[in-house]
């Protein structure tokens, strides 16, 4: 018997401990519980979790929609489940939601050394448009600015 497909839904307060666990395992400068909680109250923030029957919450994405633009704030997947298409499902849902809200363009920052993330973003048509020198405070690494156009027919 096949396992049920992963389910994507809006992140709620009850999800924050699971999200925080993934956050801490994924980032050198993780957001705090309070920062994540504040996202839930921002009118322009969209926050989704993805869960699998046997693993619970396995990933999340947080992005902002302001007028006709989106800014990807966070995306992370449990480390033992990376490379299985979970991040792609989250980005696909973000793009779908943005198209429904008439968003035409988006951007994000990514560590210049984060090759798996760069490959994922490029797969969805993100392109490097600039560099933020010394952007990451934990080690002074540069961030690549990536931008993309939203196809509203998606």
Image (cartoon, grey):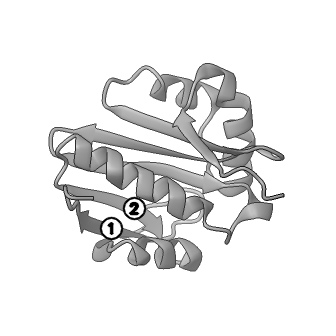
Residue 122 image point, x, y percent: 40, 77
Q: Quadrant of the N terminus?
A: bottom right
Residue 118 image point, x, y percent: 47, 76
Residue 107 image point, x, y percent: 29, 59
Q: What count of labels does the image hold?
A: 2
Answer whether residue 47 is visible to the viewer in this image.
yes
Residue 144 versus residue 53: which sits nearer the camera?
53
The residue beneath circle 1 is 145
Given the current orientation, which residue lies at the most extreme front position? 1
Q: Quadrant of the C terminus?
A: bottom left
Q: Is residue 55 above or below residue 137?
A: above
Q: Is residue 100 above or below residue 36?
A: below
Q: Going from the N terminus, do you reach mark 1 or mark 2 first?
A: 2
Q: Could you say whether the residue bearing mark 1 is in a helix, strand or loop? A: strand
The residue beneath circle 2 is 109
Q: Is residue 88 above or below residue 75?
A: below
Please say if the residues under marks 1 and 2 sit with CB atoms less than 8 Å apart. Answer: yes
């Amino acid at each position: 018997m096949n396992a049920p497909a992963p389910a994507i839904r809006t992140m709620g307060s009850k999800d924050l401990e699971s999200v925080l666990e993934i956050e801490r395992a994924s980032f050198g400068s993780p957001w705090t519980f309070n920062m994540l909680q504040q996202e839930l109250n921002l009118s322009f923030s969209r926050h989704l979790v993805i869960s699998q029957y046997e693993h619970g919450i396995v990933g999340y994405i947080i992005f902002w929609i302001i007028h006709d633009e989106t800014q990807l704030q966070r995306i992370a997947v449990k480390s033992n489940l990376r490379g299985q298409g979970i991040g792609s499902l989250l980005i696909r849902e973000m793009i779908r939601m943005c198209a429904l809200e008439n968003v035409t363009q988006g951007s994000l920052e990514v560590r210049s050394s984060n090759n798996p993330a760069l490959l994922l973003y490029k797969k969805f048509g993100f392109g490097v448009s600039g560099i933020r020198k010394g952007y990451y405070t934990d080690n002074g690494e540069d961030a690549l600015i990536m931008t993309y156009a939203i196809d509203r027919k998606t």
